[in-house]
Amino acid sequence: MEASKIDRIVRQYGARESAILAILQDIQAEEKYLPRETLEYVSQKMRIPMVHVFRIATFYNALSLKPRGRHKIDVCLGTACHVRGGDKILDKLERDLGISVGETTKDKRFTLESVHCVGCCSLGPVAVIDGDVHGRLSQEKVPGLLKDFK
Amino acid sequence: MPKLKIDGLEIEVERGTKVIEAAARLGIIIPRFCFHPGLGPVGACRVCAVKFEEGPVKGVQMSCMTDAQDGMVVSTTDEEAADFRKHVIEWLMMNHPHDCPVCDEGGHCLLQDLTVAGGHGIRRYLGKKRTYNDQYLGVFVQHEMNRCIQCWRCRRFYQEFAGYRDLGALQIAHHTYFGRATDGQLESPFSGNIIDICPTGVYTDKPSRFTGRRWDFERGPSLCIHCSLGCHIITSARYREMTRLEARFSESVNGYFICDRGRYGFYYTNHPERPRRARIRTEEVSLDQAIQTAAQKIIQINQKNGPKAIACLGSARSCVENQAMLIRFCRVQGWNEPTYFETPTMAKKVKRAVARLDEQLAVSMREIEKADFILAVGADPVNEAPMLALAMRQAFRNEATIVVIDPRPVFLPFEFEHLPVAPDDLEPCLTALIKGAVHRSAAEKMGEEALRFYDTAPAEYPDAPIKNRMVKITQKLRQSRYPVIICGTSIVRETTPDVAADSALLLRAARGRAGLFYLMSEANTFGAALLSSEEGSVMDVVESIEKGSVKGLMLVESDPFRSFPDYERLKQAVDKLDLFLVMDYLPSFAARLAHLFFPTQTLFEMETSFVNQEGRVQFATSAYRGGIPISQISAGGHPLRVFRRDIPGGESQPAWQILAKLANIISLPGREMFSLSKNELWSWIAKEYPIFANVPIADELPDDVRVHLAQGREKLFPSGGQIRSGGLSRENSTLELVMGDWTFGTEELSTYSKYLQQVEKEPCLFMSPKDASMLGLKDRERITLPLDKGRLEMELRIVDTMAPGVIVMPKHRQLAWQKIEKWPVKVAMGQIRK
Ligand code: SF4
Ligand code: SF4
Ligand code: FES
Ligand code: FES
């Protein structure tokens, strides 16, 4: 991320330690992840030790240190989805996409993650793609599910 | 005060005491991982669960999070509580490696102890353990993150307690990682403490890793002598080698922690070049033979040139026993008394400080933590006396205001108000602040002298910005309930210790309570100042040698080559001597030149005592018998199994015993004979110096004996009318050179440590941006600095946190700075070049 862009974000919130989360969120939104050089720049500019910037960056699931795909799939492994075979959905996705949970496909199309309950247990097993819930999944439904995402 | 019952025993404690602490006072140690008396509670581990049977709280609760309250009935042995604790340990062990035999913590591991004590033996969970990558944390600390039980002690010490922020917590929940953002040497000079406090083996002592289990070591209570504070330590020795040092709790001095200079400075005692045999010139002889030869030589010189022809130098790193015996020796021989100080100015400053420190003003480091206003003058705590910085930080955490008046680029691990002013401005700034905060009437009430001090003391700040900054601060001091003045003795003027004491008296009169805390240069500077009556200096001795009136020189644990300004001149003087006798344990330059050399014992090998900078007489027991470390003669193999009667390299003796033996041979019949008993020596000390009379000559280690000159003997406010205004001496064409200390690289003993050598920074010259731009110099340029006796080359660092008109340089081991003839040193501006 260019320095001028980071400067703008920092200016917007002020270089206070308490603003660090908001600043990281904005960077994440723009870049889809938090590049290391950007964090180093932020740490120096705001005079906040790197270990503290990392603390925030690694504390929240919404923030990522690794480049992200264009689409994010969260497979639910909460109790209800687990009983109904959430892990099988995850298995199938891992096989079809050729990545493990937490990773991003080479073409940057998908990032695969697991979550613990998204609050619609009656629809389980559930996966959330870019914020939209897809319920009552089965392994057979998986290929069709991915088709529409470019 | 709440009264409660724990396991049937009743106890009354102050309000705010946690149940876990109340129990400890009864001798009941409730299991704990996260709670630490120095760090307080956080409730992170849940292993301190106890059953509250009656009172305001009921059921199983955390004893570290619960305040002791009236009527509580607590059981630590209750079945439900014990079962709870057992499960907590089982959970913690779920991710913990089961490999104590290859962990260096094994044997002194809290987790190991509690796992065994709690009865968790069989692993039931068969899933995988979470694993981490370890980091390189530098020379001192080994990292093994898989052993972490997330008690947060390390982060709480490192960031909250000590104020450094390069080690912290990362990630979340059971993935929480304690470490740095990247590999690298820990930045805090207190980093070693995380080794002591981590309840498992995440951080272990790297230099001594795998050198033994706790029970393999000879362990004993001792003292740190790498600065004047005298922190308490525990030594571990094995195979004739000092191996590891840990902090020892002290109620009044260092609390639970020590600094890294103290922890890793001890390697001089194992130094491979440490001289361990007596020598006549280059020939190694037995100690007795050397003593005989020395005695003959001394008798000869005494007879031919008279008793004043032999001069003695002692040092402030020597213990009380050595210092005292050297004086006794000189007195019996009718010689001049030994010299303990490098310059007469230094002697004078320290003696004034010692004289002014009375029982009512003196404060300990623990008391500094309670101050609400700290005013440090000519003191650079992190570099001169590291643990003081931590004590000041605790005051800061309790919202104290902290002001430092010092020309050097002082760094402290907390926010403080720094007045970077030239040495001449230190006193005026101090009195300006005091006069601003203390009303004249307070001085008036204290009598004529106080009033004279008040009225004649200048009240000026060097410039308007500083003056403006001080308005609010002065207001704070005016309202302070417990102000403390910290006064250094190295870079200040001769009068400053008195000005600091007089200021403290005024503050006490105005505020009802005030403290005074001096810093000194070495571990036993206070002892030397108390014992020695002469104010001679090394320079006087050298001059007498040149004139031919001194023919013999005896050095007792002293190396004048370290600090004497003119190296060549000193060497020539030494070459002229008929007798050059050196007793030491360091491979010093003087030791190499000695005609007669005697190996002495280090603190770790003898029973000994030191007086710290607040006048506290402290005792150390010997850790081991001494001798050449087995590792140095066994080529790293298994310990030798060679049987012999003596200890290889074990000839060293306490310097005071060598002196006693020597004296007994030279003494004419009828003169006093010296005993080799420490108690006898101490009775002599107590007789000659009544101030030591209340020191118990016992084997225990009391740490609460303070010796101070009796109240009322000293004239108060002697500095009245004497404080010079600062601005007068300011010249624009010269820069004043100020020599400072660095945490690593300047203190004599610790510079022999191969581990501290690895973390030393390159010496450099500090200059303010204003002066640098006038000279057209840039940051990190190599420059030459002309001194009286030659030039020095080093890197220039431009920093905006120091006084203009001043240049600052460390007395660094890697820098041949001994080229100065007279203090203070003023360098003409144009003389500093690229
Ligand atoms: S590294 Fe040690 S001190 Fe730090 S949280 Fe883990 S177990 Fe506690
Ligand atoms: S502060 Fe001084 S006495 Fe204490 S451990 Fe450090 S060097 Fe030793
Ligand atoms: S468990 Fe999957 S939505 Fe609740
Ligand atoms: S010691 Fe009480 S919760 Fe850890």
Image: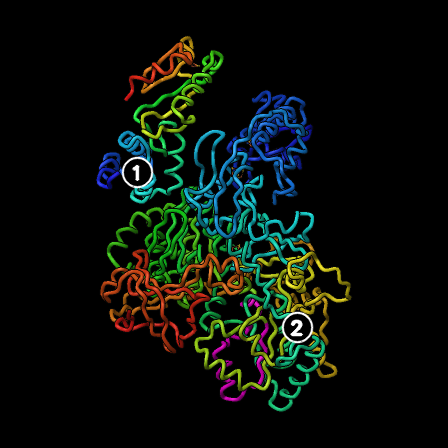
Give the image quarter of residue B110: top right
Residue located 32% across and 65% down the image: B806
Which of B539/A9 is in front? A9
Q: Residue B277, which numbered label?
A: 2
- In the rendered structure, the answer to whether residue A147 lies left or right of residue B536 reads left
Q: Amino acid at mark 2?
A: Arg
Q: Position of residue B478 (x, y in %)?
A: 36, 48
Residue at (27% x, 62% y) in the render: B778
- Assign a secondary structure to mark 2: loop
Residue B464, image quadrant: bottom left
B738 relative position to B47: left or right: left
**Which region shows up in magenta?**
B528-556
Look at the numbered disc 1 and give the secondary structure of its residue.
loop
- Callout 1 environment at 10 Å: few (<14), some (14 to 19), or many (20+)? few
Please, is residue B794 above or below residue B165 in the view?
below
Q: Position of residue B833 (x, y in %)?
A: 28, 71
Q: Is residue B447 visible?
A: no
| Magenta span contains residue B342 | no
Residue under pointer 1? A16
Q: Chain of mark 1?
A: A
Q: Chain of mark 2?
A: B
Q: CA distance from mark 2 to mark 1?
A: 62 Å
